[in-house]
Amino acid sequence: MTLFPKDSPETIFPADPRLTAYALGELEGDELARIEAAVAADPALQAAVAELRAFSGDLATALNDEQLAEPVDGDLRAPSPKTRRGWVPPFPVHYFATAAAACFAVVVWINHDRSSPALEKATAADEESKGVAHLSESDHRLQLARKATAAPIASPVLAPETKDSVAALHEMPPLPTVGVGAGSLSGRGFEAPTPAVSSQQGMGFGSALGAAPTKDLGSARLSFVGRTTATPDSFAAAESYATQADNTQRTVASEPLSTFSIDVDTASYSNVRRFLTSGRLPPRDAVRVEELVNYFPYRYEAPTSDVPFAAHLEVASAPWAPAHRLVRIGLKGRELDAATRPAANLVFLIDVSGSMNSANKLPLVKESLRLLVERLRPDDRVAIVTYAGSSGLALPSTPASQKRDILAALEELSPNGSTNGAMGIHLAYDIAKANFATGGLNRVILCTDGDFNVGVSQPAELTRLIQEKAKSRVFLSVFGFGMGNLKDSTLESLADQGNGAYGYIDTRREAEKVFIEQLEGTLATIAKDVKVQVEFNPARVASYRLVGYENRILAKEDFNNDAVDAGDIGAGHTVTALYEIVPVGVGSDGAVRPMVDALKYQMPAPVAKRRTDDTEVVPPLAELLTVKVRYKSPEGDVSRKQEFPLIDTGGPFTEASRDFRFAAAVAAWGMVLRDSPHRGSATFEQVLGWAESGLGDDAGGHRGEFVQLVRRSAELSR
């Protein structure tokens, strides 16, 4: 199998390195035609190209205007006016052009220790000598770079749009300083052979990432970042992810029940995609396997009765451990469309703080919500609440029939100030309750990067606030935007406590998936507090492991406790969970153990259980397991239960359904990305083969995109 066939279909993202090369005129031939066609068809790509060209032009102009000497015949002389604009000066300015032409980004990062008295004194003296009373952040960092390189360069005067672009780059966290071996930057590409840098925090792929050429500047440094230069940890140094250890094998003899809350969050997948399309492997804790698997819709049949969902069970051999069995539990929610769903009372809660001032934050929020507004019914209502240093009502609750007013209010939003999210949450829920639609859909839609830094800002305090607000029966959906300071763990927690889902929107295409393709599921909840409990048959199963859902595990007693919160299912949503099972007689390492005669006195006697109709039955020994699902109606407080038994007929992985094979491939990909000790024989190459065998009718192209991301993962791990 060829891992990177030349004629394979391609998906172009705004962060794709080839887009920068296209913007700078560095592509030609077939590749130029492909990228050009993609840009012509996608407004988001057009905007990205325009921004890249503007930034490149402004930065080149500002830097080339510096009074640097030009080497001619071994001497130094000032460039003539005729050659000044076109001249490429020596290091470090020359590298801005060469590195940008071949890489997806060129990052200038000055990291100085503000607590260093010596540096502060030097900086103050430098500013005083130049008569500068105040420097912008971008000017200040550029000045420090010049001072560190000992180049007698005057402080440039940047155009406002240039300063914005530089400030956007400054949102990138500091990169690790690494040693530089023999290498060079030459021609049209970044072709420096560099020593390997060991990966950090459990990336553990066996092969290290390449290091970027970095000039050590003491308290400041200038780094040129290629596609695999920075580790994911440095790329996301200001981002936060909850640390979770992988679930382990549990023995049925001691723990016959496995209980967890369902999860329809999908943020991890699009966030991982953001890392990969930016040329970096994601940090381990950003990869939540269940969210990768549940990102994709599966062809499960919808319920035909009045129950909110149907269950679909399947079992086959585990592809990464063929001696083990893999069980898939699939739930399919009842489907609604715009005509059959109840009217919606929505409040857009939008972060307009200064941290939202970049193209993939507030502008993308506006674009995403415009897509939603265009799909609403005339009897739906929308209010807009904003928050920064304080909160405000940008638009009172307005019928969606007045679409023009809603869109105009969105367009007027601009970023400014600090982030007092708690004040915005209070106001948004107040507006939602004041316009509560009895029997309708009442939901707050929070759009933010999660960087709460004023007022109630600690995750635990914010979580308690949302827990209290959720009692109003107003649901909460949380969508993360942007990069560099994404507070993933906080946003996930808020969505969990607010009876809603957490998604991450990195592109317009993702916004279309959430607010067009899956709109009814985004708005309408058909079941809440959905819990799953699996009872394993000790005659068939020696041990089991739940793949993913590490932060959704519940105590067995929680299953029947209606006071314990759990996840919710939206209209038409599919939920998938996988169990890796070690059959009786097979070791956890896959080796078949010698069989002995059954022990007469040690064999556990079948235990009777009582059904809801008060009849007593004995679990059939042929069953592998029984899945129990407990849920509440969206307006109810008392749960109901359904049960579904599963018999294993011993089928191999190759004969499993396409959905089964694809879900297994996605789970294996997540385990490899996490460097899970339970990944068995799984590799990126094997994942690719399993995924391609499960593509089927790829509506929306999401599975095809996944194949491309697997290829990118393999490339970056080399």
Image (spheres, rainbow, N blue to C red):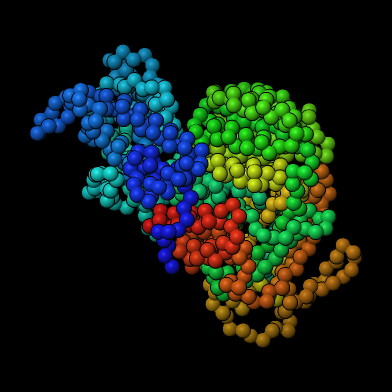
Q: Of residues 622 and 457, which is closer to you in this image?
A: 622
- Is residue 716 shown to the viewer in this render? yes
Residue 33 shown left or right of residue 467 in the figure: left
Residue shown at the point (38%, 19%) measured from the top left: 135
Residue 614 image position (x, y, % from top left): 90, 65
Residue 345 image position (x, y, % from top left): 75, 34
Quick one: which residue is furthest to the right in this view?
614
Residue shown at the point (9%, 33%) measured from the top left: 73
- Where residue 207 sits, quadrant-wise, is bottom left
- Where residue 61 sits, quadrant-wise, is top left
Q: Of residues 109 and 67, which is closer to you in this image?
A: 67
Residue 147 image position (x, y, % from top left): 27, 26
Residue 461 shown left or right of residue 48 in the figure: right
Q: Of residues 482 and 536, which is closer to you in this image?
A: 482
Vertical side of 168 occupied by 211: above or below: below
- Where residue 597 sits, quadrant-wise, is bottom right
Residue 206 shown left or right of residue 575 in the figure: left
Quadrant including the C terminus: bottom left
Vertical side of 220 occupied by 102: above or below: below
Vertical side of 367 occupied by 582: above or below: below
Q: Of residues 485 and 185, which is closer to you in this image?
A: 185
Quadrant including the N terminus: bottom left
- Is residue 442 shown to the viewer in this render? no
Quick one: which residue is furthest to the bottom in this view?
597
Residue 211 shown left or right of residue 587 in the figure: left
